[in-house]
Image (cartoon, rainbow, N blue to C red):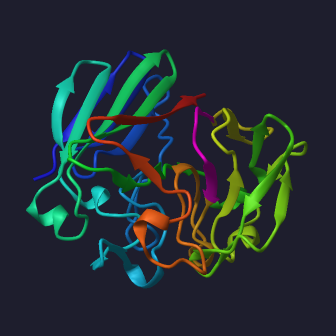
């Protein structure tokens, strides 16, 4: 049974579920304001799932490794598995998922996947992913975050996202659920990205950040609340809301990996933007969210 893990620094009250190590609530203690989407299952039943060992969709929900075919659904299995709480203080929580016979039936690698939450100062929550290869050969994986932030439905088009550095970013283009690298496009971050539901008709807007530090600020001119996301070393940042649902939230998603390309050969060793990790090595990806 899932357990709620609580963090509190006197300014923010944070709740994390051991199911998927998912962040489920961030509240300002003084005002009681909730920053995260509540997870209404009729619209989108999640809050901030952690994506591992893939990000996005595999072609036909399958891949090959050493001539054997494995099946895995979108964004991988970590978000639907119980994590163990291995460290907990008032302001820190480390949750861990390790391989099992069940995971190895769909992902034939031994691993340790830690998700670490840390309230670092009055208004900031740090999130870190640590993937350790506990196998005897290289493992292949992607990892990412998917936090959904409340945006009142009646005010959706009044909100904007500022991206820094303010430059022109190449974008990754999806055709259906798959990446098409033959389509070249860009986003000019020298102007704010005004939220418009029609921009998500074909799924997420995806910035190619290429591992460079990037900051996104979600707010509106007259808002007293907003969030600032600092992404340290992700390859991509996705921005998404479910177009058809009229959802009162927007996701800002740091990704260390992406969906299969339209011409993928399904061999996980060849997968575009996959991370390869040698035995006994640890990969770390991190980002932080400041709430105001």
Instruction: Name the residue rendered at 66%, 32% in the picture.
Output: 213
The C terminus appears in which quarter of the rendering? top right
- Report the magenta residues as a range: 228-239
Q: Position of residue 89 (x, y in %)?
A: 23, 18
Q: Position of residue 237 (x, y in %)?
A: 63, 50
Instruction: Name the residue rendered at 17%, 35% in the picture.
Output: 85
Instruction: Name the residue rendered at 44%, 54% in the picture.
Output: 142
Position of residue 76 relative to residue 48, above or below, is below
Q: Is residue 144 left or right of residue 78?
A: right
Q: Position of residue 281 (x, y in %)?
A: 32, 35
Q: Is residue 103 left or right of residue 245?
A: left
Position of residue 245 relative to residue 133, above or below, is below
Q: How many marks?
A: 0
Q: Is residue 206 left or right of residue 247?
A: right
**Viewer-proximal residue, 20 or 243?**
20
Position of residue 102 relative to residue 85, above or below, is below
Q: Quick check: is 234 in the magenta stretch?
A: yes
Residue 195 makes an appearance in the image? no
Picture quadrant of residue 86: top left
């Amino acid at each position: 049974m899932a357990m709620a893990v609580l963090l509190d620094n006197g300014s923010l009250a944070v709740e994390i579920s051991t199911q998927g190590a998912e962040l489920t609530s961030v509240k300002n203690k003084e005002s009681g304001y909730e920053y995260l989407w509540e997870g209404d299952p009729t619209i989108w039943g999640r809050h901030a799932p952690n994506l591992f060992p893939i990000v996005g969709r595999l072609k036909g929900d399958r891949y090959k490794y050493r001539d054997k075919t494995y099946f895995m659904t979108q964004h991988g299995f970590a978000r639907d598995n119980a994590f163990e709480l291995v460290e907990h203080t008032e302001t820190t929580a480390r949750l861990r998922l390790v391989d099992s016979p069940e995971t190895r039936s769909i992902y034939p690698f031994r691993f340790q996947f830690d998700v670490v939450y840390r309230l670092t100062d009055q208004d900031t929550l740090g999130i870190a992913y640590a993937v350790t290869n506990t196998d005897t050969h290289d493992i292949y994986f992607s990892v990412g975050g998917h936090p959904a932030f409340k945006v009142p439905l009646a005010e959706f088009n009044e909100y904007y996202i500022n991206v820094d550095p303010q430059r022109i970013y190449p974008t990754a283009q999806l055709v259906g659920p798959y990446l098409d690298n033959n389509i070249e496009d860009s986003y000019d971050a020298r102007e704010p990205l005004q939220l418009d539901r029609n921009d998500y008709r074909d799924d997420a807007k995806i910035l190619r950040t290429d591992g460079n530090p990037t900051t996104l600020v979600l707010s509106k001119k007259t808002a007293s609340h907003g969030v600032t996301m600092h992404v340290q070393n992700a390859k991509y940042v996705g921005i998404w809301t479910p177009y058809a649902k009229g959802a009162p939230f927007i996701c800002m998603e740091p990704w260390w990996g992406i969906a299969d390309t339209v011409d993928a050969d399904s061999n996980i060793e060849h997968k575009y933007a996959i991370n390869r990790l040698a035995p006994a090595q640890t990969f770390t990806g991190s980002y932080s969210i400041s709430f105001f």
